[in-house]
Amino acid sequence: MSSRTNVALVIGANGVIGGNLIDHLRTLDGWDVVGVSRRGGTDAPGLRHVSVDLLDREATRAALGELREVTHVFYAAYQDRPSWAELVGPNLAMLVNTVETVESVAPLRHVNLMQGYKVYGAHLGPFKTPAKEDDPGHLPPEFNVDQQNFLEQSSRDKGWTWSALRPSVVCGYALGNPMNLVMVLAVYASMCAELGLPLRFPGKPGAYDTLLEMTDATLLSKAAVWASTNEQCANQAFNITNGDLFRWRHMWPVIADHFGLAVAEPLPMSLADTMADKGPLWKDMVQRHGLADTSFEQVSSWPFGDAVFSWDYDFIADSSKARRFGFTEFVDSEAMFRSAFDDLRERRIIP
């Protein structure tokens, strides 16, 4: 690594958040980047990748213990588990292993943690909206809360600070990610076009008309750097959203139009079940349209789509705190979806 002012350690480098954050950091002066993931990646000027299983404490110490120049940790890793309680152990352990290793060898200045609306209980059912950062907590288990508690306690009387960002659904490019709504919409719409079908909203009946919001991945990347490099953001949590609200009833025709599709009445269905047999269709589409060689598993996030389309209650947070602290950027969500779909076409992921 070169002797630049800042060295960013991006944990979860192949995800929607981590991958887009790396892209953003590489556009900035004064940053070198180390991407950490289990799969690894391709090195480039100012970027190196480290492959490690963060659940393995000794392997983490061996892999990250050599990174003696890290100044900022951007933590966006996630391990899925079957229940809320089972999520706590591995997701807390990965953060603990990372931070304890880095702070012992490097001049760490800040740890930025990616959270979400689970902090507010959004995954459990209707919650207070718009949610605010200082809203009262709820009964555990909740790994986001445990992670923040760890950072609060570990940073006391030390030379580093922390921040926590709470985006809504993060939209951006990534392959092989279990939480990728852009890919869900793009592949679903592309298959409807392939089969000559209209685009139907597949979620719960009430979810078509509730209010929700999105968080553009590049916007979130900018917010992460802002929160990690401004003193007033130290030891603070911020909701980060595009800044607008929408209902699927009004966004659905926008998405359909972008794929040249008609809109038919919603039809509640599980995408995880409905798409279970669509592997051969996808393989045929890749071959006939000359698409990039991506497997069906790489473009499938169907359970996540089912989760998002099941929100038959408002799913919104108050992002005014970030604006008061100085982050004033915003993104038009309709334009974000169009741009994301165009990007997938340019990459030859969809027809």
Image (tube, rainbow, N blue to C red):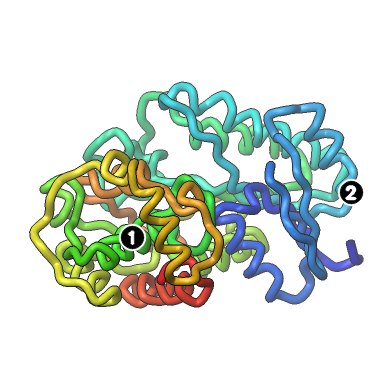
Left or right, 91 with respect to 253, comes to right
Name the foreground residue: 201 vs 2: 201
Name the residue that disc number 1 marks: 185
Name the residue that disc number 2 marks: 68
Left or right, 137 with respect to 55, comes to left
User: Callout 1: few (<14), some (14-19), or many (20+) C-alpha neighbours within 10 Å?
Assistant: many
Q: Which circle, 2 or 1, is nearer the viewer?
A: 1
Earlier in the chain: of badge 2 and badge 1, it is 2
Left or right, 43 with respect to 117, comes to right
Name the foreground residue: 7 vs 54: 54
Kind of residue at disc 1? Leu
Q: Percent position (x, y) of residue 205?
A: 11, 48
| Tag of residue 78 | none
The N terminus lies in quadrant: bottom right
Q: Are marks 2 and 1 in contact (CB under 8 Å)?
A: no
Residue sitting at x 18%, y 56%: 201
Secondary structure at badge 1 equals: helix
Q: Percent position (x, y) of residue 306?
A: 29, 44
Instruction: Determine whether 65 is above or below 243 in the image.
Output: above
Q: CA distance from mark 2 to mark 1?
A: 42 Å
Kind of residue at disc 2? Arg
Furthest-left residue in this view: 265
Name the foreground residue: 122 vs 198: 198
